[in-house]
Image: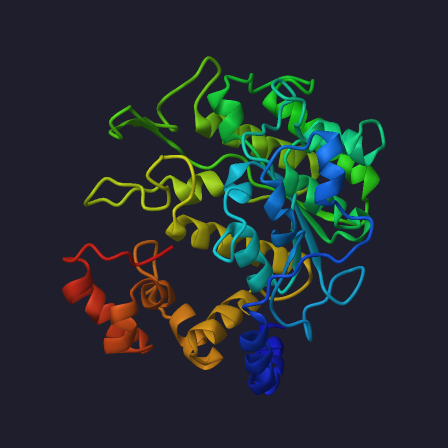
Amino acid sequence: MRRNLIRKILVIFPVLAGVIFLSLPAVSVADDSDSFSVEDSQDEGVSGDLTKANEMPAFVENGPTDYVQGKFGKKPQIVVFGDSQFDRDRTSSGLASRLAIYTHSQVFNCAMGGSMASSSNDNNGIVDIAEVIQNIKNPIDVFTSVFPYYAYNGCDLSKTDIFIIEYGINDYMNDVPIWGNDRYSYYGALDSGIKMLKESFPLSSFIITGPSECEIVDDDGNIIGNGCDASNSYGTVEDYAKAAQAVAQVNGIIYADIYSLTKESNPESGKNLKLDRDGVHFSDFGKEAVSRKLSKISISLLGYDSIIVDTTIALINGISLYEVSRMIEYPYNSDFFNAYDYYALNPDVRIIIGTNPDDLFIHYVCTGMNENRIAHY
């Protein structure tokens, strides 16, 4: 199947390249007369920078549509419910935009900074969102900031191919109980919310990420601990991640292990390069790693080979699918070195060495290791 897909992609490669390069800069806003407007928000008490409401996308729509199709129409639709990992950066470098580019989908970013899976704090947890969908609650009472409300109001949720549920760090930091059966525990909220969403959208697929790693930083910016060894009243970040994985298993949905992906530190510097200086949010490196992982899972759920993600990145970088395949399938790839990642992560190496995986490996062993270069996502 994979080889047949590669042949199909190679046939359309020249046309596809033109489509991608023409469409990548575009970030569009849903043109819907019923969607959220600045005027509406003035009376309803939605907080946020209202003067910029119409400049922010209800969804980002990048990439070609000629061979990636969703269940409900030509372009797949992904909806994100989560926290500031998605909400904080709604630009072309944010997680939602990267996800849209790599999956060739519409991504509706309904994430709210500071929100938790649990309903313990501001009643905007995953069960509260599910109650909005089931017409139990008013969306204005749950989506209390302008951009998530705007995104929620701009999409037809019944046409959603994939829901991504991304919570955990704020539950950990706010000392929310991990285990329980109600909406005020982390496990209980995720389990109840997922069940309600599956009931409302039985044809949709679901991905749950759980929390990412975090670092405990003092007032001077010094790292004094991290989420895998600093426990709150109920456990560590890793314990919250295990609870999210349990929810996925019980409900028969995909668990994307973002915690393991983001907990690695650079062995030389001791710094976690996937986290920003605040120790919580993703760095650019982290956003790229997480978006690639979520994109490959999403593409697979849509029924396509995940090599489409690598193909898209290859076109963005101006190299051929053949060159990408050589690097991806290089026999000396390991947990420490990946030829394709080493090429992507080191621009100067790209210029000097090129795409030959043997040359990249030799450069890493002879030079890159001594220079503490990053060799894999």
Instruction: Give how far across and how far down residue 86 sits, in percent.
Output: 54, 44
Asked which quadrant contains residue 367, the reply is bottom left
Instruction: Give how far across and how far down residue 359 sits, in percent.
Output: 25, 75
Placement of 51 over or under 347, stated as above or below: above
Q: Nearer the viewer, residue 142 or 118?
A: 142
Extreme-top residue of the structure: 233
Q: Residue at x 61, y 28 (%)?
A: 117
Placement of 359 over or under 257, stated as above or below: below
Instruction: Give how far across and how far down residue 17 sits, in percent.
Output: 55, 80
Asked which quadrant contains residue 369, the reply is bottom left
What scheme was used to colour the molecule?
A: rainbow
Q: Residue at x 73, y 45 (%)?
A: 37
Picture quarter with the C terminus:
bottom left
Q: Is residue 254 something that shows in the picture?
A: no
Asked which quadrant contains residue 337, the reply is bottom left
Q: Is residue 235 left or right of residue 161?
A: left
Q: Is residue 23 something that shows in the picture?
A: yes
Extreme-right residue of the structure: 135
Instruction: Give how far across and how far down residue 26 sits, in percent.
Output: 59, 66
Placement of 162 over or under 242, stated as above or below: below
Q: Nearer the viewer, residue 47 or 206?
A: 47
Number of numbered tags placed on the structure image: 0
Picture quarter with the N terminus:
bottom right
Q: Residue at x 63, y 59 (%)?
A: 300
